[in-house]
Image (cartoon, grey):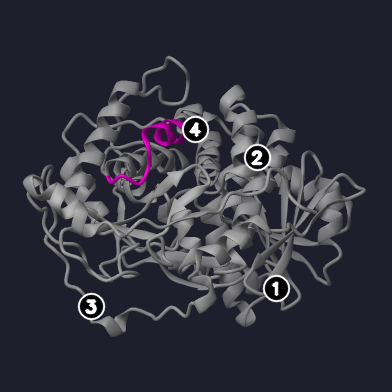
Amino acid sequence: DGHHRQIGRPPPHGKSQSPLPRPPPSAMAPVDIPPEMDNKDFLQQTALAHKLDSEDMPNGLKKLGMHIGDHVYPVYLGYNKLPELITELKKLDLDKVFLGYDEMTAKHCGPKLEAELKKQGVEFQRCVMGLTESAKTVSTLDMILETFLKGGGSRKTVMMPVGGGIVSNTFGLAAGLLFRGIRLVQVPTSFLNAHDAAASSQKQAVNHAGYKNIVGLYHCPTMVLVDTSFYSSLGMVQMKAGLGELTKNAALFGGVHYELMKKTTKVKGWQLSGEDLVEATFTGIAAKDMLLRLDPREKHIALLFEYGHTIGHALELTEGTITSHGEGVAIGMLGASYISHKMGIMSEADRKEHDDLIGWLDPEIYLPDRDLTDEVLDKVLHDNKRGYIPEKEGFAPFILNKRIGEMHYPNIYYLEYVPVPLVREAIQYVVERMRKRGYSGGKPGEVKKATRAAKPLKRHPSSFIYGDDIPEAKLQKTLDKGLTKEKSIKIEAPKEFKK
């Protein structure tokens, strides 16, 4: 996800880490934003006029042209359409395919994929990496590079990661390094990776020296092949992970994204059909296409995709919590709507509609039996969205929603100053609400025993933090002082995609 987090032991319960020094301003890379983009009318017109470069192909595949800046590449989607997808792959001028798996995709997806490659006469080589984040390292990257070169890989070889985000990132980085860049064809096998990363991102990286995604580069795919039949082995947690990000898109853009959730999670919960998953994946990629064509490095307008991540990520990174990324984002959205309502940005009725959307997903999180407020707050104050707007002591930057399809617009970064005491309130509200909901652990009615989560990867100390909490008594005065004058942008998507 491009965030830098350091591996290490969390602070003792109830205590925050010592403040990290702020680097000099020169350490922050400047962001070149076209002036016409800092205009809510321009953004609204762009959103409403968004036209998908898409078609329904005669062979039953859906084809979408994914835009990242000026770069465009095809994404092919289908359900049980592996022969048709490999036919599209063969149109590339290649000598062979270098298949990248983790231990699970090698077992569950490899046989079916390799059988089809053999059937269509495509030569391939395979390489398997570890399953977890701990395998996403420079040493694994070195193993991949060595396997590729010793196996006779060349400039005409296509790198093809088959799996989730860890596989996509690690083999994607190898593709960007070999011969200063060879072609990359992503084959995502998880719902979340299909629409939120592999199909719509050029960010490739591995962890190193205790930091997450610290060694990496930008390298766009040449093509993306998505067969939603690979999702068949996914359970409730993995499905909710993907649906959580789509729930966020529904709040951001409304329109077709909101309608998708009304006919999926609202009536079916997380149990979608193969055809539903094609549409859901397609719609998720379309959201990324709309903004990444304007902001390919995700430095201003595309920061909107960070909605819900501030508190959600902080909860994810707290030792002992158990949740998927997408569910964490949805839970973080509850905190954001709490803040937005308290600051007078979101009405009570609009907050209810927003939170009902999250209720359709019914996100879950296991929370250890201790007061988590200080731990979560500490992580919020080290969030990756700092550094875009000037530091303001006693405040944290948040992306806030006004109503479904309309985002609060204080500046080109969509970041509002939120008083730290209000952030603390929001964390307490979310934690209490989720404790009341309970945790089933993956199967309805089954209580999951507490387990010790892996040591979290923490954020890299590469930017400033915000000041100490301001007294509660000053909260209203601080709200009046800190809240940017009312601005908002309605970026509601059309009810259906234009062709």
Contact flag, marks 2 and 4 (Cβ < 8 Å): no
Q: Which residue matches tag 3?
A: 23
Left or right: where does residue 231 sit relative to residue 431?
A: right
The answer to whether residue 463 is visible is yes
| Upstream in sequence: badge 3 or badge 4 | 3
Q: Which residue matches tag 4?
A: 357
Q: Which residue matches tag 1?
A: 153
3D distance between C-alphas at marks 1 and 2: 25 Å
Q: Which residue matches tag 2?
A: 108
Occupied quadrant, residue 383? bottom left
| Upstream in sequence: badge 2 or badge 4 | 2
- Residue type of the residue flagged with mark 3: Pro
> Crowdedness of circle 3 by 10 Å Cα count: few (<14), some, many (20+)?
few
The nearer-to-camera label among 3 and 1 is 3
Number of numbered markers = 4
| Upstream in sequence: badge 1 or badge 2 | 2
3D distance between C-alphas at marks 2 and 3: 46 Å
The answer to whether residue 171 is visible is no
Rendered residue at 49%/44% (across/down)? 248
**Magenta highlight range:** 343-355
Q: Nearer the viewer, residue 468 or 187?
A: 468
